[in-house]
Image (spheres, rainbow, N blue to C red):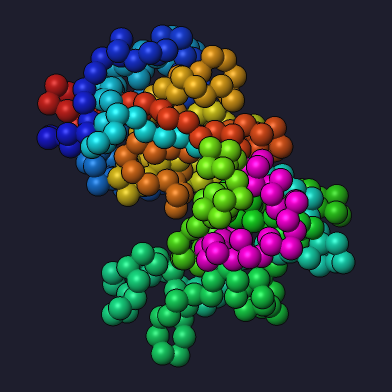
Amino acid sequence: MALPPLFRKISFDDMPGWREDDPAPAFAAFRRSAVRSLEKPYRTGTLGVEAQAFAAAFAEARAVPELGSAPARDFFERHFVPHAVKPDGRDRGFVTGFYEPEAEASPGRTGRFRFPLLARPSDLVDVDDANRPAGFDPYLAFGRAAEEGIVEYHDRRAIEQGALAGKGLEIAWLADVVDAFFIHVQGAARLVMTDGTRKRVTYAAKSGHRFTGPGGILAELGEIPPADVTMQSIRRWFRDNPNRIDEILWRNRSYIFFREAPVDDDGLGPVAAAKVPLTPGRSIAVDRLLHTFATPFFIVAPTLGAFGGGGFRRLMIAQDTGSAITGPARGDLFAGSGAQAGEIAGIVRHPADFIALLPRPMLAEGR
């Protein structure tokens, strides 16, 4: 098939750090997607990386419980052909980081625990071309079922001021509104409950509104220099300006709803958009409209040292997405769970080269 011109074929020898990386953890992540694909095949992204072209690689991965470094490298070299992703007008892409926060929470509201995480409301409806009302913002994928039909859902400000109060949607209560907000940003969390239990919450739905990050707002207002915007600097600003938290957070109209989920493996993250648990340091969130889940990406970010070592050169598997992750060479690297992972994820804002490993069967040489 004819690939978009932004894919430029290269060789594995052209990939800096390919021979030094250990792809065994990436193979384990890929295998989880291979198993999941038996339940429901992934959708082909608009860039044309055909989901069905993964069939041979998926079948072999499912047949092998695990692989060491050298066999895993051989697996990817046999089944895939590397292509540098070169968007028009830009030589490089950009990566950020995300993680699964851990926070103390209460099963009920108390004087200290006042900020809820909410389950999906019954009046929230999915919106697509089949039911989208005339004039309804085409960006919005969710709406509210009202007497007059589907209307825009309540935004963050309305919800935090009580639009959904009394509906019994509270899963847990947090002591800090900023912690709650960053759980919304990450889309999942591990909660240490005051009654001694532990639970995980993960994304269930959202209000549908556009996401507006506080970092961009604070940079625009001149509160934090753009080059210094990190999760840590944003938290410091909120700590120093508690009377302005609502002012800033309410400019982000997007609101996330959650569901409870099990923690089957402490070493893995939450089940994400590709319906598999995320692998720390090996799962990447991509633009799901463009890319096909399970696509391996070799990411080269020489100035990124937060994950350890001199720069970042690592094979990642596309297994999640995010509203801020748009474009063919834009990715979010999953750092893991807990505070230490948050310290890593919070400072990842780096230019990076994206190399997509495309299945051989979809290429002329693979036929």
Is 49 situated above or below 78?
below
Is 304 or 159 nearer to us in this picture? 304
Which of the 4 image quadrants contains residue 231? top right
Q: What residue sits 47% from the left and 31% below the top?
A: 350
Tell me if residue 249 is in the magenta stretch: yes
Q: What residue sits 17% from the left and 28% below the top?
A: 363
Q: Is residue 88 left or right of residue 17?
A: left
Q: Is residue 142 left or right of residue 106?
A: left
Residue 167 location, x and y as percent? 66, 78
Which of the 4 image quadrants contains residue 131? bottom left
The mark tally for this picture is 0
Residue 230 location, x and y as percent? 60, 40
Tell me if residue 137 is in the magenta stretch: no
Residue 328 location, x and y as percent? 32, 39
Tell me the magenta residue range: 231-260
**Viewport quadrant of the C terminus:** top left
Residue 184 visible here: yes
Q: Residue furthest front?
A: 222
Is 76 situated above or below 251?
above
Q: What residue sits 61% from the left and 61% below the top?
A: 248
Residue 212 location, x and y as percent? 50, 57
Which of the 4 image quadrants contains residue 245? bottom right
Is 95 situated above or below 156?
above
Residue 63 visible here: no
**Viewport quadrant of the N terminus:** top left
Is 327 situated above or below 31?
below
Q: Is residue 103 left or right of residue 90?
A: right
Q: Main secondary structure of the magenta part?
A: helix
Q: What residue sits 51% from the left and 53% below the top?
A: 220
Is 9 or 147 nearer to us in this picture? 9
